[in-house]
Image (tube, coloured by chain):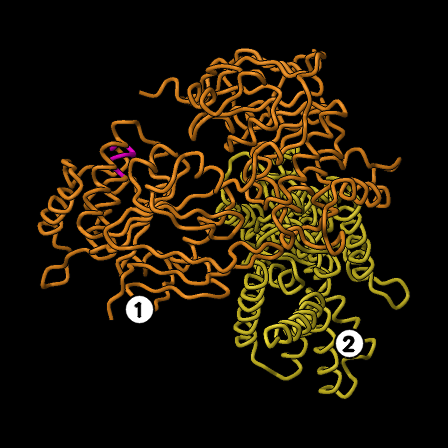
Amino acid sequence: MANKTKSAAGIALKKVGKFAAKYTTYLTFVVLLVVLAILTRGGALRWISIKNLLIAESVRAFAALGVGIIIITKGIDLSIGFVVCLCASVAASFAQPADYSGALFVGKQFPLFLPIIAGILTGTVFGLFNGALVAYGKLPPFIATLGSMSIAKGLQLIYTKAAVVGSLRPEFKKIGQGSIGPIPNLAIYVLIAAILVWVLLKHTKTGTNFYAIGGNIQAARVSGIKVELGLMVAYGIAGLCYGIAGTLQASRLGLANSLTANGMELDAIAAVTVGGVSQSGGVGNVGGMMIGVFTMGLINYGMTYLAINSYYQQIVKGLIIILAVYFDMRKYSKR
Amino acid sequence: MDSEYAIEMLGITKQFPGVLALNNVDLRVKPGSVHALMGENGAGKSTLMKCLFGIYKENAGKILLFGKECHFTGSGDALRAGVSMIQQELANCPERTVAQNLWMGREPMTKLHFIDHKKMHDDTIKVLKNVDLDISPETRMGSISISKQQSCEIARAVSYNAKVVVMDEPTSSLTEDEVNHLFKIIRQLRDSGIAVIYISHKMDEIFQIADTVSVMRDGEMIGTYPITDLTKDKLISLMVGRDSKERFPDIGPMPKTNVTLKVSHLTSSVDRSFTDICFELHKGEILGIGGLVGAQRTELVESIFGIRPVKDGEVFVNGKKIGKLEPSVLIKNGVGLITEDRRRTGLFPMMSITNNTSVPSLGQYLNKMHLLDHRKIGTDTVKYNKDLNTKTPTMETLIQNLSGGNQQKVIIARWLMTLPDILIMDEPTRGIDVGAKHEIYMIMNALAKQGKSIIMVSSEMPELIGMSHRIMVLCEGRETGILNRDQMTQENVLTLAASFMK
C-alpha cells in the first residue's frame, strides 16, 4: 500500500517535471523577461528595447537556424563564426562604391544583387564542403568543421588582405538597416526564414528525415533514407543560412573585417541548446531555436543593463552552454 | 559469518518500462559447483546477471556473497570482490599484450611507482599456467584465438582470487576441442572451490558439465534441480513451459505459388561471411533461416536488403532483377526488413510512435505541393498500429517508453505501411515477453495468409520449427540444406547447422 501511494506521488511529480521539461525554454524566457522588466522598471518592455533586441539578435538567429538543423542530425558546426565572417567579407567586397579608393575592386560598381548572391553562395559552398566531409568522408563533424573553420579564417584574411572592407554603398546597407514602418527589415527576414525552416522540418520529407538521421542513423539507413545525401542537404542549408547571416551582418554594420561574427558559433550553439535542440540528435524545433536565441539576447541585454563587465559576460555565456548541455544530457542519456 | 552458499540472490525483482523482467527471483549457488542457468531468450537470465554485477539496479531483493550482503556498482567492482564475468563477447584490448590485458588497472609497481615489467611478465606466466595456456605474455591479445583469449579472461578472473565466475554462452564460438579444453578448466575451477554460473542453451554441454540447473522462464525462477534429476525432455519442458504445439498458430501447408524473391549465388564482400547462397521464396510462404551463432544469417538478410556489401550474385524480386542492392531500392520493390537489433538499427528512441511508424513510407504521403500530408499519415499510422494491437498511451508517446513487444509491433506497422510483398524478419520475437510473442506469431501467420512472403531468421528452435513452411540452414556462411515441413526436427536442423564444424 505504502508503495502504491509513493508511486502515485512519484507519478504526479513526474507529470509536473515532464510539463516543466517540455516548456522549460518558454518558461525560462518568460521568467527572464519578467525579471528584466522589473529591474528596468518596464524599460525592457518598451518598443525601442524590443526593437534593439530584434536587430541585435537577428543575424545570430540565422546562424542558429543553420546549426539547429545540423544538431538535429546529431552533428555540430564549429566553423560558423569564421564562415559568416568570410561571407560578410565577400558580400562587402562587392558592395563597395566605385569611387572608393580603398575598395577591393577599385573602380568597379556591381549590381546590388551580386554581394547578396556572392555572400550566400560562399556560405552554401562551405556548408556543402562540411557536409561532404561528414557524409562521404565519414569525418566526425567536430573535426571536419574545426578544419573548415581554419580554412575559412585563412581565406578571409587572404581575400581581404587582413584589411577592413568598409564604406559600403548606402543601398546595400539599407538591406540590413532599413525598416518597414516600425519593424526592422532584419526581423522580417528572420520571421520569413523561421517559417521556411519550420516548413522544411515539419512538412517536408527531407526535413523529417533529418530527425531520423539524428535519432538513429543506422535505423534511418534501414528505412531507406539516403543518409549521406540527407547530411549533405542539412549542412548545405545550414551554409546557406550562414551566407545570409554574413551578408546581413555586413549590411547592418556597413563593413566587414576579420573580427566580424567572432565567436558566433558559441552564441548559435548555446542558443539552440537553450532552446531544446538536443546534442543527442533527433530532437528540436524552430520555435525552441528562436526562443533560445532571444533568451540568450535577453541575458546579454540584462548583463549589459546591470553593467556587468563584458569579460564576465563571456564566462556567463560559457557556463550557460555547459549547463544547458548538462541538463540536456541528463534528460536524454538515461534510457 | 560463513554461509553454505557462495552467492545468494534473494527476491530479485526488476521492472523495466512496461515489462516485469524479473519477478521475485531466487538463485543460490554453492561453492565448488557448476551451476547452469537455463531459459529461453528473454527469460531473464542476462538481466539477473546484470543485477548481480550492478549494471542494473534491482527494484527489490538482496544479494549475498558468502552470507554477506553486497552491492556491486559494476563488473570492475565485482571483480575486486571475487565475482567475475566471462562475457560472450570478450571485452579486452586487442592491440595490447596479454600481460597488459591481464593486469590492466592494477599493474605491479616498482618502489619508484613505475610499472614493474619484470614482475608483470613473471606473474602472467604463473597465472596462465592455471588455465594450461603456454603463450608469451608479450603476445598481442588480438593475435591469439578466441578460445585462448577466453582462457586469458578466465586466468584474469582467477588472478583476482575469484570465488564466483559467471560464464555467458562461453562455447558459442569455440570448436569441439576448444570446448573440451574449456570444460577441463571449468572442472579445475570447480575443484578449487570456485562457484561457476554457467549460462548456455546447449543441452549436451549442460549435461556434461553442470552439477545443478536452475531454470528461468518469463522473468521467473521455475526451479533448481540437481542434474541427476533431469532429462533433456524434462529440461526442455521446464524451459518452454508448455507444449510447443500450442504456442504457434497453424500456418498450413507450404503454398504452391509463384516465386516472389529469388536469391542466386549471393556472396558477401566480407571475408569469412557467407558464400554462394541460393534460394527461392514463394508468395505466402514463411521461410525460416536457422543456424548457430556465426552462421551469418543476419549478414545474409542485411546484405539482401543492401545494408551490407555483396561481391557477387543476384537478387530478383517478383521476377525483376534488382540492379543496385540498396534499402531505398528494395523498399520501392516491396521488400521490408525488421532488423535483429531493435535498439541499434530499428528504433528512433526519441521519436513518437507516429514518426517511428511513418519514416520509410513518407514518400507515399506527399501532397501536390510535395509537402507531407500529416492528416493521412496520422490516420494510417493509427490504423496499422491498431490492426497489430499496439498498446500505447498516445500516438505521440516516445517509442522508448513502450515495452519490447509493443516496440516490435510499431516496427512491423512501419513496414506494413510501406505495402511490402516480402517481409524479412530477423529474430522477430527477441527480447519480448511470451504473450507478445504469441501475438507476433499470429500476425506473421495472418500476413502469410494474405499473400505476403516472409523470411524469418530465428535462433529459437521451437519458433523456427513451429513457424516455417521451410527452413534453410546455414553453417559458417554456407547453405547446408533446406528442410521441408515433414523433415523438421531439432536434430535435423542441428545436424545441418553444425555440418562444417569439426
Q: Chain letter for orange, please.
A: B
What's the residue type where badge 1 is placed?
Lys
Seen in the image, is B35 located left or right of residue B313? left
Chain designation of label 2? A
Q: Name the residue under label 2.
A: A49
**Residue B68's disc number:** 1
**Residue A289's disc number:** none
Q: Does the magenta stretch include residue B439?
A: no
Which of A34/B309 is in front? Answer: B309
Q: Check the image and name the residue furthest to the right.
A: A181
Which of B85/B271 is in front? Answer: B85
User: Is residue A173 depicted above or below B243 in this figure?
Assistant: below
What's the residue type where badge 2 is placed?
Ser
Q: Please tell me how crowded label 1 is: few (under 14), some (14-19), or many (20+) other residues with Cα within 10 Å.
A: few
Seen in the image, is B199 located left or right of residue B468? left
Q: Colour of chain A?
A: yellow
Q: Closer to the camera: disc 1 or disc 2?
A: 1
Q: Which residue is drawn at 78% across and 62% down?
A: A177
Q: Where is residue B439 in the image (x, y as percent from the top left)?
A: 68, 40
Q: Where is residue B288 in the image (x, y as percent from the top left)?
A: 57, 24
Question: Is the magenta region chiefly helix, strand or loop?
Answer: helix
Chain designation of label 1? B
State the SS at label 1. strand
